[in-house]
Image (cartoon, rainbow, N blue to C red):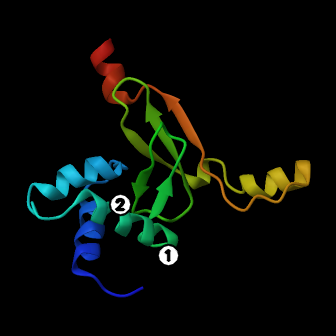
Amino acid sequence: MKYSKQRELILNSLKENCSHPTVEQLYEFIHKDQPTISLATIYRNLNQLAENGIVKKIEGLDNTAHFDHQTHDHYHFICKHCHQVFDIPYDIAPDLDQKVKNTTGLNVTSYDIAFRGICKNCQNSIN
């Protein structure tokens, strides 16, 4: 993958914005400082970064793709109240892919697991 100043800007912005943003959210974040960058540029570059394994494209959290700069194995938690996405450590339930294979014979090649509930901040504000 060739170097691109825009791609570097997008990747750095994703690392600074650890909330698992959508393309549109990342565009709003970047556009404040770089008003000439287009939404199409961000779409294209994020998809290229995901295809090359540099970022993780997370689908199935809601109706749009989210992006994560953390590519190591981990799970996600989505707050049903504020819709924020949190990382859950992999070691809580390691080797799920192998357990699925051992139990069902199915060979898992990838997975995205998302837990849903209410985050600590929303729990505190509701109580």
Determine which quarter of the picture holds residue 55. Answer: bottom left
Determine which quarter of the picture holds residue 3. Answer: bottom left
The residue tagged 1 is 52
Labels 1, 2: front one: 2
Q: Nearer the viewer, residue 33 or 74?
A: 33
Residue drawn at the location 33% of the way across and 48% of the way down: 19
Give percent across and percent down for residue 50: 47, 67
The residue tagged 2 is 43
Give percent across and percent down for residue 26: 26, 53
Crowding near pointer 2: few (<14 within 10 Å), some, many (20+)?
some
Cβ atoms under marks 1 and 2 closer than 8 Å: no
> Callout 2, which amino acid?
Tyr
Say above or below: 115 vs 74: above
Crowding near pointer 1: few (<14 within 10 Å), some, many (20+)?
few
> Callout 1, which amino acid?
Asn
Q: Secondary structure at mark 2?
A: helix
* Relative horizontal placement of residue 94, taking residue 19 as reference (left or right): right
